[in-house]
Amino acid sequence: MDLGLKGKVAIVTGGGRGIGKGCSTVLAQEGCNLAIVDLAHDEDTRQYMKELAGQYGVDVLELDADVSDEQQIEQIFRKTIGHFGTVDILINNAGRGAIRKPFHELTTEDWRSVQEITLNSQFFMSRGFVKYCREQKRPGSIVNVLSKSAFTTNSKDNTTYISAKMGAYGLTKGIANEMAPFGIRVNGIVPGYVQTERTYPDGDARTERMRALLPTGKFTLPVEIGQVAAFLCSDCSSQIIGAAIDCSGGTML
């Protein structure tokens, strides 16, 4: 693809693993310079970033930060803009996995931990990005990673995660409507079962059980999510605003 993104600067939260890694890879292929944010980069993610820079000739900035912390988020934007001079794209991917408990057994800490990392981080990061774009009178694009589980009714013992992801959907719609007149587009991606090194490894019995439930018998790959994200960040999708693009492979669960 050539989506006209060469030279753009993108921040990708949780951009060294899983869905975030898929987004980082495709954006680098398209010629974007990247600020990859993670709570704590390890040798695997550092090696991945070196390979991205070498293979695609882009500049990759490593940022360690907690995206649920407002002060650290200010540092993310300060360092990114200080390094690249600007920022054009935000991929809000970082999140916390589900805490599988019956609703009446959830603790306050269970609730807060999921909301803070999965929902609040998208609010704080989006607010920082929009502030910059408005101050500089620049257009921009935000893509929020949502979840199919927020749109289903049979995800058992998953209230914290469903609530956070549905909140992120509402956040996406609200910012999109408010910021569209200023050239800031906001959309969401709705993954279902995504095969990563951590979720559904080939050969695992659970993987094969889940595969049998998929209409195509195929898990979505992180890079396929990344391709949709890159499209949503490009001028090719200029009239897509406030959408939640289903990338679940037809999953109804």
Image: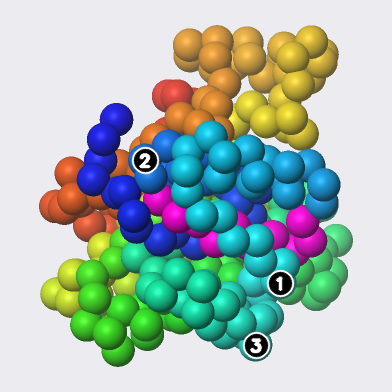
Q: Which mark is residue 130?
A: none
Q: Is residue 169 left or right of residue 197?
A: left
Q: Is residue 143 left or right of residue 24?
A: left
Q: Does the magenta portion include 82?
A: no
Toward the viewer: 124 or 101? 124
Question: At 42% across and 37% down in the image, what residue appears?
Answer: 29
Q: Main secondary structure of the magenta part?
A: strand
Q: Quadrant of the N terminus?
A: top left
Toward the viewer: 68 or 27? 27
**Quadrant housing residue 163:** bottom right
Answer few, some or many: residues within 10 Å of disc 2's Cα (few below 14, many 20 plus, some between 14 and 19).
many
SS of the residue under disc 3 = helix
Segment colored magenta:
32-41
Q: Amino acid at mark 3?
A: Gln
Q: 67 above or below 152?
A: below
| Residues under numbered marks 2 and 1 in contact, where contact means CB atoms less than 8 Å apart | no
SS of the residue under disc 2 = loop
| Residue 84 coordinates in the image, percent (x, y) | 45, 70
Q: Please name the residue that numbered disc 1 is placed on.
A: 66
* Nearer the camera: disc 3 or disc 2: 2
| Residue 60 coordinates in the image, percent (x, y) | 56, 55
Q: Which mark is residue 71?
A: 3
The residues tagged by marks 3 and 2 sit, at their Cα atoms, a distance apart of: 31 Å
Question: At 23% across and 45% down in the image, what residue appears?
Answer: 4
Q: Please name the residue that numbered disc 2 is placed on.
A: 30
The residues tagged by marks 3 and 1 sit, at their Cα atoms, a distance apart of: 9 Å
SS of the residue under disc 1 = loop
Report the number of numbered marks. Answer: 3
| Residue 95 coordinates in the image, percent (x, y) | 65, 57
